[in-house]
Each structure stands twice: as C-alpha cells, then as structure tokens.
Image: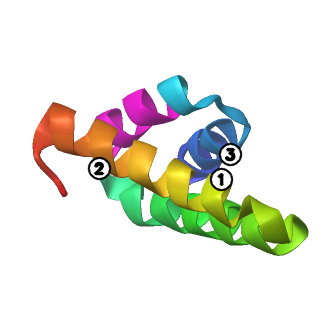
Amino acid sequence: MNRHRQIVEQYRKAAEDERIYLYLDCPALREAFIEIDRTEAMNVAVENRSGKKQAHKFRRTVSAMLSDCCGLF
C-alpha cells in the first residue's frame, strides 16, 4: 500500500506526459489519478474565472490522449 501512495504522489507531481505513462502502467490506481485530475481541473477553473477554457482544454487534451492510446473515450 505504501508503494501505491508513492505512485499517487509521483502522479500528483508529474507533468502531463509522465501522467499518461503512470495511468497506463497502474490500472489499479486509475480512480485516484482521475480524481487528482478532476480536482486540479476544478481548482484551475475556480482560481481563474477566465480560465474555464483552460480547464476544458485540459480535459479535452487528456481525453484525446487516452482515446488515441487506448480507446477509453
């Protein structure tokens, strides 16, 4: 379990490209990863009201990357 916490923390600190690799390599932690992404996207939208487009762009980017690599969306 401690290893899972380390991986989740690594995901939290990672750039988008590394996050995709962690997401694909650790299917057991995907729910935690999705929650991190969801929370961060919501925080971006709240912190910067004009940033709604940025939050939507992030979600579209992640969805597109997952769709391209493994047909999830």
Circle 2 sits on which residue?
27
How many angstroms separate mark 2 from mark 3 (CA)? Answer: 16 Å
Circle 3 sits on which residue?
12
Q: Amino acid at mark 3?
A: Arg
Q: Amino acid at mark 1?
A: Gln
Where disc 3 sits, the SS reads helix
Circle 1 sits on which residue?
54
Q: Which quadrant, please, contains the C terminus?
A: bottom left
How many angstroms separate mark 1 from mark 3 (CA)? Answer: 18 Å
Q: Verify CB contact (< 8 Å) between mark 2 and mark 3.
A: no
**Front disc: 1 or 3:** 1
Among numbered discs 1 and 2, the one appearing first in the sequence:
2
Taking 16 as reference, is 42 above or below it? below
Q: Amino acid at mark 2?
A: Pro
Q: For this view, does 38 lie left or right of residue 39?
A: left
In the rendered structure, which segment of residues is drawn in magenta? Answer: 19-26
The prevailing secondary structure element of the residues shown in magenta is helix
Q: For this view, does 38 lie left or right of residue 43?
A: left
